[in-house]
């Protein structure tokens, strides 16, 4: 049986796009454009189909109001001041010999991991290297690169890329993404982030299974 | 939500991709460049075992500001230590300094500009970009410039020193507002005012390296001091290596008292009286030394002979016999005599004191008594004695000043409150804004100053901050959410001191100045930004020209401008070495004896005072100069040249502050007399203490070794050691009230009541309770306030927070201490409060 | 005691086979210090605590936390303080505590914590001395290095906690952030290691570095010219009165200059099975 390069590429591209969506959602307060897109029939139907409940008001309130509400919710959930979810791996993951806190041993590991692949942190990026959105964006980029390799019918490099993805997931994202999503689901006051966290959690679970299958294939 | 499967996952992917394809994701990705995976790129395990990078910098936990080394591993600050080449610190750092690492990485840290979206105090915030934040500030500040009311912009700072202070003053001058509030009057203001009235300058340190005898009034030298590490290590070394005795007068057995040769318990507010009775003993037993008399003025006569001066001092202190002092202070007369004799006979001796002496009614006058005791034994500015500390004289770039310079008269207390508020009356800043009689700022910006915690009657401060009709726009620069920032309209994420540039200048007890800098050990976390950069960002928006665009550039210019540092290699040298001092410099002991050339154009001798001054520099004609005299010409003190000391013009003690004086130590002060205060150091009973009932107690506050007043509660390693502040109470006092160790007690003043816990101890005098003032935080992160985050992945997700084992966070005493000022200096009278204590 | 010249190792050999021979308790309790360096060129690291100089500032406590990234709830170094007497004759004293890096009793030279370690004696290891000689010794999860440091190999540790119970000073605890390498369901034991990572690179321990009173003096007892050797001689520190719990026969190598008898009046021992005496607290 010959290799279906197109299907493998599409699959990788899909994964890349989902990581991209999740990264966008957790990176910062949603823009008006993103809200508009997420309320569009295309996505809203998929969300409905998946049972992703973004809440009545998400669809009915004026866009500017949704943006404002979500900005406040995002700040309350992820920025502070006061109790908040610090969306960084070093905060969630225990590491032998490290007593935790921002810019921990895990932060350094993530930064090195990412930089070893030839990527750099953008000059304009002011967050910490192990922010949830960075790790998701890294996966997005890896899967995107994998897509290219499949399209070039370079099986060796594509599989190598998958190995890198699997390593990153196992060493980093899988270690904390569930806890992170649970925390968001518990603390969210309006449905948007709760739904997004649930979606992310489910997706990561799906990844956990499927990436193992992919590798076995 | 439904379970994902391959089919619907592909659908979601299509949707997700479309959202991204439409370019509606984040404006800028976090990652740049493209993946270049290589065959060898499979080993990703980071290696962390390597030699740490060492960077010299400076501490900022307290005003001591030790030069230190920061150690960095993989861009992460892991350790701080003293700077081995510092002539001030000799490579040492205190517990607070060691815990500086905690400031950077605690999970509650504020990392982004935050705009208030709910009501003040509702804790609802929205993150905004720096552009939005600065645009908003500029939109509030610009109208003030346009309306010619720059003074309606008020800047309030606490711990700003070195270039952090000078760059702020430069910006405020460029803006044109003199409405700048400080915090010194809640700290030690009366001490400086007392010294300035004599020395013409301030900042006493002590030459422990050469002293033979130390007497301490109310200074907790071994735990907390404004020049802690440089002085305290030298004191303990002197004690052990050279058997130097240390006698400590204190109401409480502080660690300093505990390590002293002897702790002498003393009643509250009696330090000055005991000092004067020591003067009495020394004068009557002829133990004084005449050497310094020629630099002292002890009566209205500027030209009195030594004998006349001796007679005058004797007469002034005649009534302060040791027996009289014993009655008031509780210190046995024999003990006073013993210590007075030992002190006077020692080859050299240090008289030290701090808040215990000065944070009282007429506290500034008590400091004058300390100076008198030093001067009559020739221990002032001499080797082994009390010396004027010498700090680094940095040059700094200056921006053009605004043409219009105005200030609101709200920083020096209410009319008539303080006669010489040379260090302001900061505890009344917010009460004066509430009062409104001298106007109110429209834009109020505070930095490193937790007004709603550190002042007396702090609940009132909180109410003022909360009231938008009193403060229409309030900006707070901070690293942690605290009692004050909770009421801000805009919170700006400050950098920690481990992430910024500064020139530093804290005094050296060795008599030789140390120049040192602070440099970033790591990149500022998140979007935190230094005040200097914020000033530059505002200036750009307001069309104001500044002499720098970044703090680094400001510091670089300072290094290239400052003589000595410049020749040593300037900025590059300082970045590499951190510290510099002139190897050929001699200690400044005896500086007042320096002969001065008075042959310059315009220099004349004022016969009345013996001052040589330059009338041309003062801008008056020779005729006016001689008719009005030195004391009669405004600005003449700035044209001071020398003092005629027995026929020789000498530097003496130039009037470097607002006090108009000759070059003599003004122990007889016309300034004081003119304002109705005792012109010679004396004992003035504290009014509240004269009216105390039988059951009333004194309340005093204090600091411990492991915390600053309000900026370290979130440092977990410090709060682990000290997080609660039970009220110290003597066993007798406690027994009278049926109070036992650990009992809950009520402490009530005329202002209000708090409930706290009793610590029954033999380490405090009867009739008083003492409460350390660091605790009882409303906010300050999980480690400071114990506010357990309800968020499982939130602030408590610092893995170490799981190990946080203490659940007590203390009680803040300031809500029952009124804002009440020393009428001489404006210093907050922390130690004069009268309370009633009972079991809760 | 300080001028007693005893060839320690040969004596140990001599006593080695004697087993439970009844030796007078006082003789056992007397700390043994070999100031002659007769047997090996390995250093013998030791700490002298000059209690006259300790001002209770806690810089050591925090420096240790920072240097060794010690989690909350436990310490590698603490200060005990106590207020004594009746007003106005009240005194307050400070006592710095850490691992005593015991030499062990004279029969076998194995401290109780090492003896309790199920992984000891394990494989042989080599210790290279400054002059290039090799000293062989046995390691365990807890073991004594030839330079006197009692160290923990967390990779070997099985998290059984026996060493924690065995230490009469109660200076050991489980590190909640490091898993025991020998049993990853458990946490590894942890305690002061004299900052071996610094000392091995020629740098003083962190607590010594930061001590403003210079109350902590660290050095090599096998070097007769070291500051610690001089202090041990000058103040006659190798006596039961200048170490903690001499009666345990552990032969501690943290010596206290203690003219005011603080060890006897202040030291709070661990209560059986508890470690709350080893938490640094300021009232």
Image (spheres, coloured by chain):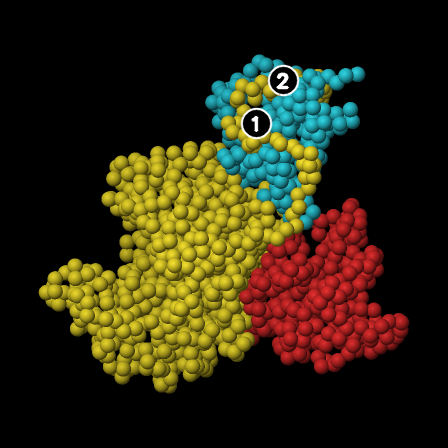
Chain colours: A cyan, B yellow, C red
The residue at which mark 1 appears reads as: A24
Q: Nearer the viewer, residue B773 or C185?
A: C185
Question: Where, by quadrant of the figure, is residue A160 drawn?
Answer: top right
Q: Position of residue A20 (x, y in %)?
A: 60, 26
- Residue at figure coordinates x 70%, y 63% from the top left: C99
- Residue at figure coordinates x 54%, y 19% from the top left: B22
Please, what secondary structure does the residue beneath circle 2 have?
helix
Q: Position of residue B149 (x, y in %)?
A: 27, 41
Q: Can residue B807 be seen in this view?
A: yes
Left or right of B648 in this view: B826: right
In the displayed structure, B817 sits above or below B311; it is: above
Chain letter belonging to callout 2 = B
The residue at which mark 2 appears reads as: B14
Q: Are marks 2 and 1 on the same chain?
A: no
In the displayed structure, A114 sits above or below B666; it is: above
- Residue at figure coordinates x 73%, y 65% from the top left: C132
Question: Where, by quadrant of the figure, is residue B590 drawn?
Answer: bottom left
Q: Nearer the viewer, residue B691 or B86?
A: B86
Q: Is residue B683 visible?
A: no
Label 1 crowd bin: few (<14), some (14–19), many (20+), radius 10 Å: many
**Disc number at residue C215?**
none
Left or right of B605 in this view: C164: right
- Residue at figure coordinates x 36%, y 59% from the top left: B563
| Residue ranking furthest to the bottom | B285
Left or right of B70 in this view: B64: left
């Amino acid at each position: 049986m010959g290799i279906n390069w197109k299907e493998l590429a599409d699959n990788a591209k899909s994964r890349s796009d989902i990581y991209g969506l999740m990264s966008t959602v957790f990176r910062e307060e949603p823009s008006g454009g993103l809200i508009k897109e997420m309320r569009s029939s295309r996505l809203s139907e998929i969300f409905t189909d998946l049972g992703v409940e973004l809440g009545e008001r998400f669809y009915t309130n004026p866009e500017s109001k949704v943006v404002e509400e979500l900005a406040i919710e995002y700040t309350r959930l992820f920025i502070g001041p006061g109790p908040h979810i610090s969306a960084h791996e070093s905060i969630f993951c225990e590491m032998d010999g490290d007593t935790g806190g921002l810019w921990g041993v895990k932060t350094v590991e993530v930064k090195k991991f990412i930089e070893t692949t030839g990527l750099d942190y953008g000059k304009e990026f002011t967050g910490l290297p192990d922010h949830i959105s960075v790790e998701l964006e890294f996966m997005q980029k890896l899967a995107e690169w994998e897509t290219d390799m499949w399209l070039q019918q370079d099986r060796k490099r594509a599989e190598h890329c998958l190995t890198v993805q699997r390593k990153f997931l196992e060493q980093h994202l899988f270690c904390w993404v569930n806890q992170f999503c649970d925390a968001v689901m518990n603390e969210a006051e309006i449905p948007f982030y709760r739904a997004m966290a649930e979606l992310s959690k489910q997706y990561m679970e799906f990844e956990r299974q499927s990436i193992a299958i992919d590798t076995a294939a | 939500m439904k379970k994902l499967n391959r089919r619907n996952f592909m659908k979601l992917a299509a949707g997700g991709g479309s959202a991204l394809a439409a370019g509606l994701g984040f404006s800028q990705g976090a990652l740049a460049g493209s993946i270049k995976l290589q065959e060898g790129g499979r080993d990703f395990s980071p290696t962390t075992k390597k030699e740490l990078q060492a960077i010299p910098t400076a501490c900022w936990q307290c005003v001591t500001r030790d030069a230190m080394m920061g150690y960095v591993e993989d861009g992460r600050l892991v350790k701080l230590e003293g700077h081995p080449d510092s002539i001030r610190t000799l490579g040492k750092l205190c517990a607070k300094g060691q815990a500086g690492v905690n400031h950077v990485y605690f999970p509650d840290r504020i990392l982004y500009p935050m705009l208030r979206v709910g009501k003040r105090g509702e804790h609802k915030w929205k993150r905004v970009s720096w552009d939005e934040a600065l645009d908003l500030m500029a939109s509030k500040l610009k109208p003030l410039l346009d309306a010619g009311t720059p003074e309606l912009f008020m800047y309030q700072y606490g711990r700003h020193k070195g270039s952090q202070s000078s760059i702020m003053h430069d910006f405020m001058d460029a803006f044109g507002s003199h409405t700048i509030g400080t915090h010194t009057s809640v700290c030690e203001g009366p001490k400086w005012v007392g010294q300035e009235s004599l020395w013409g300058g301030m900042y006493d340190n002590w030459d422990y390296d050469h002293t033979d005898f130390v007497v301490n009034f109310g200074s907790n030298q071994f735990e907390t001091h404004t020049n802690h590490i440089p002085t305290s290590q030298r004191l303990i070394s002197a004690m052990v290596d050279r058997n130097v005795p240390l006698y400590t007068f204190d109401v409480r057995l502080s660690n300093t008292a505990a390590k002293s040769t002897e702790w002498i318990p003393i009643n509250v507010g009696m330090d000055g009286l005991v000092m004067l009775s020591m003067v009495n003993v020394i004068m009557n037993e002829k133990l004084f030394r005449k050497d310094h008399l020629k630099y002292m003025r002890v009566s209205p006569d500027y030209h009195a002979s030594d004998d006349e001066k001796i007679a005058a001092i004797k007469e002034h202190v005649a009534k302060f016999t040791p027996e009289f002092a014993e009655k008031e202070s509780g210190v046995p007369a024999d003990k006073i005599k013993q210590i007075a004799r030992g002190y006077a006979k020692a080859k050299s001796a240090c008289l030290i004191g701090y808040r215990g002496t000065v944070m009282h009614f007429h506290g500034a006058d008590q400091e004058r008594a300390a100076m008198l005791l030093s001067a009559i034994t020739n221990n002032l500015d001499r080797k082994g004695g009390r010396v004027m500390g010498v700090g680094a004289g940095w040059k700094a770039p200056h921006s053009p000043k605004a043409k219009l310079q105005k200030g609101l008269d709200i920083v020096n207390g209410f009319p008539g409150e303080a006669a010489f508020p040379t260090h302001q009356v900061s505890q009344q800043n917010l009460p004066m804004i509430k009062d409104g009689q001298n106007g109110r700022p429209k834009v109020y910006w505070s930095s490193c100053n937790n007004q709603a915690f550190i002042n007396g009657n702090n609940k009132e401060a909180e109410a003022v901050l909360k009231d938008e009709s009193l403060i229409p726009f309030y900006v707070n620069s901070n690293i942690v959410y605290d009692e004050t920032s909770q009421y801000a309209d805009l919170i700006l994420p400050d950098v920690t001191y481990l992430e910024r540039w500064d020139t530093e200048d804290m005094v050296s007890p060795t008599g030789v100045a140390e120049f040192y800098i602070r440099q970033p050990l790591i990149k500022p976390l998140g979007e935190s930004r230094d005040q200097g950069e914020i000033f530059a960002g505002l200036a750009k928006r307001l069309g104001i020209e500044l002499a720098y665009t970044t703090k680094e550039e400001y510091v670089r210019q300072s290094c290239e401008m400052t003589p000595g540092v410049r020749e040593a290699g300037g900025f590059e040298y300082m970045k590499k070495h951190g510290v510099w001092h002139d190897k050929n410099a001699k200690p400044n002991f005896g500086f007042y004896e320096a002969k001065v050339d008075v042959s310059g154009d315009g220099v004349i001798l004022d016969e009345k005072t013996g001052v040589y001054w330059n009338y041309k520099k003062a801008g008056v004609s020779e005729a006016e100069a001689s008719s009005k005299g030195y004391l009669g010409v405004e600005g003449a003190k700035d044209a001071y040249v020398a003092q005629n000391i027995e026929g020789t013009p000498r530097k003496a003690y130039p009037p470097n502050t607002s006090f108009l004086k000759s070059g003599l130590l003004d122990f007889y002060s016309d300034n004081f007399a003119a304002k109705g205060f005792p012109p010679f150091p004396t004992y003035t009973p504290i009014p509240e203490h004269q009216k105390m009932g039988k059951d009333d107690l004194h309340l005093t506050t204090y600091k411990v070794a492991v915390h600053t007043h309000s900026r370290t509660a979130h440092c977990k390693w410090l709060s682990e050691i000290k997080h609660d502040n039970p009220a110290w109470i003597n066993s007798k006092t406690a027994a009278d009230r049926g109070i036992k160790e650990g009992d809950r007690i009520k402490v009530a003043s005329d202002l209000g009541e708090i409930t706290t816990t009793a610590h029954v101890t033999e380490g405090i005098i009867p009739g008083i309770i003492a409460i350390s003032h660091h605790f009882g935080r409303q906010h300050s992160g999980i480690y400071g306030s114990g506010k357990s985050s309800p968020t499982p992945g939130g602030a408590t997700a610092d893995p170490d927070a799981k190990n946080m084992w203490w659940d007590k966070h203390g009680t803040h005493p300031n809500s029952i201490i009124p804002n009440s000022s020393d009428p001489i200096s404006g210093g907050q009278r922390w130690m004069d409060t009268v309370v009633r204590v009972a079991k809760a | 005691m300080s001028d007693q010249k005893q060839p320690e190792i040969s004596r140990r050999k001599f006593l080695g086979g004697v087993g439970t021979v009844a030796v007078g308790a006082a003789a056992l309790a007397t700390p043994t210090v070999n100031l002659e360096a007769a047997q090996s060129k390995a250093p013998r690291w030791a700490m002298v605590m000059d209690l006259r100089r300790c001002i209770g500032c806690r810089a050591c406590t925090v420096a240790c936390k920072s240097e060794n990234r010690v989690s909350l709830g436990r310490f590698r170094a603490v200060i005990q303080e106590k207020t004594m007497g009746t007003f106005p004759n009240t005194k307050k004293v400070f006592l710095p505590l850490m691992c005593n890096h015991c030499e062990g009793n004279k029969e076998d030279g194995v401290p109780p914590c090492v003896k309790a370690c199920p992984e000891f004696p394990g494989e042989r290891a080599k210790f290279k001395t400054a002059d290039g000689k090799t000293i062989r010794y046995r390691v365990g999860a807890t073991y004594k290095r030839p330079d006197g440091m009692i160290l923990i190999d967390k990779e070997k540790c099985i998290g059984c906690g026996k060493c924690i119970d065995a230490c009469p000073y109660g200076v050991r605890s489980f590190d909640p952030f490091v898993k025991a390498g020998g049993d990853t369901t458990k946490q590894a034991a942890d305690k002061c290691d004299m900052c071996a990572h610094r000392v091995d690179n020629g740098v003083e321990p962190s607590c010594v570095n930061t001590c403003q009173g210079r109350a902590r003096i660290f050095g090599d007892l096998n070097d007769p010219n070291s500051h610690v050797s001089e202090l041990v001689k000058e103040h006659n520190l190798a006596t039961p009165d200048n170490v903690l719990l001499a009666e345990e026969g552990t032969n501690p190598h943290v010596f206290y200059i203690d003219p005011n008898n603080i060890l006897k009046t202040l030291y709070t021992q661990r209560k059986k099975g508890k470690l709350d005496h080893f938490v640094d607290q300021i009232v």
